Amino acid sequence: MKNLLFIFMLLTGVASALAPFFVPALNGASATVLIGFGLALMALSMALLVIVNVYVKTRASEAFVRTGAGGRKVIMDGGALVIPVIHEMIAVSLAENFLMFSIPAQLVNIAANSPTGKAPDSATVGNPTERANSSSTCRG
């Protein structure tokens, strides 16, 4: 839909450039001016059509890295021309991602069930006889 205006401009330029060849009343300077106007309108509409199709704008929750000719460029809160043959675009999401997990009830109640009322540290968790055997055999 956004290209419809540029296509209309292009068709108007073609019609203006070809009109002097089909309308015999247009001759001399008026024909030359009309052909020049038509060619200029065609060139302008094609240039705008290309620019509109290769300009990439970021969303609020996104950034992208454009690589290729001209080096690496990070675009946040803006846009850039990304020509498919020359550049490559890598999208990066800036949205906050939350990690959802559940804690088993046995782990939640460790502090309440310990004799001291505090949660044990990692060195005291487990079977005391296994810890004694493993600590005597491990030499650092």
Image: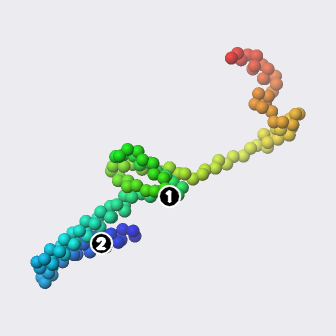
What residue is shown with label 1?
A: 59
Q: State the colouring used for the structure image.
A: rainbow
Judging depth in this view, the residue of 70 and 52 nearest the camera is 70
x, y percentage for residue 90? 45, 49
**Residue in view at x 61 percent, y 50 percent:** 97
User: SS of the residue at dot 1?
Assistant: loop
What residue is shown with label 2?
A: 9
Task: Check the image and report above or below for 134 versus 39.
Answer: above
Residue count near mark 2 (Cα–Cα under 10 Å), binned few <14, some 14–19, many ≥20:
many
Judging depth in this view, the residue of 69 and 7 nearest the camera is 69
x, y percentage for residue 102? 72, 46
Task: Check the image and report above or below for 127 versus 2.
Answer: above
**Residue in view at x 75 percent, y 19 percent:** 135
- Left or right for 130, reference 93: right
Q: Is residue 131 visible?
A: yes
User: SS of the residue at dot 2?
Assistant: helix
x, y percentage for residue 50? 32, 61
**Residue in view at x 69 percent, y 46 percent:** 101
Q: How many marks on residues?
A: 2
Task: Check the image and report above or below for 45 versus 128.
Answer: below
- Left or right for 8, reference 28: right
- Left or right for 25, reference 102: left
Q: Say what amino acid the circle numbered 2 marks.
A: Met
x, y percentage for residue 68? 36, 46
Q: Which quarter of the rendered picture does the C terminus lie within? A: top right
Q: Name which quarter of the figure residue 19 lies in.
A: bottom left
Q: Say what amino acid the circle numbered 1 marks.
A: Arg
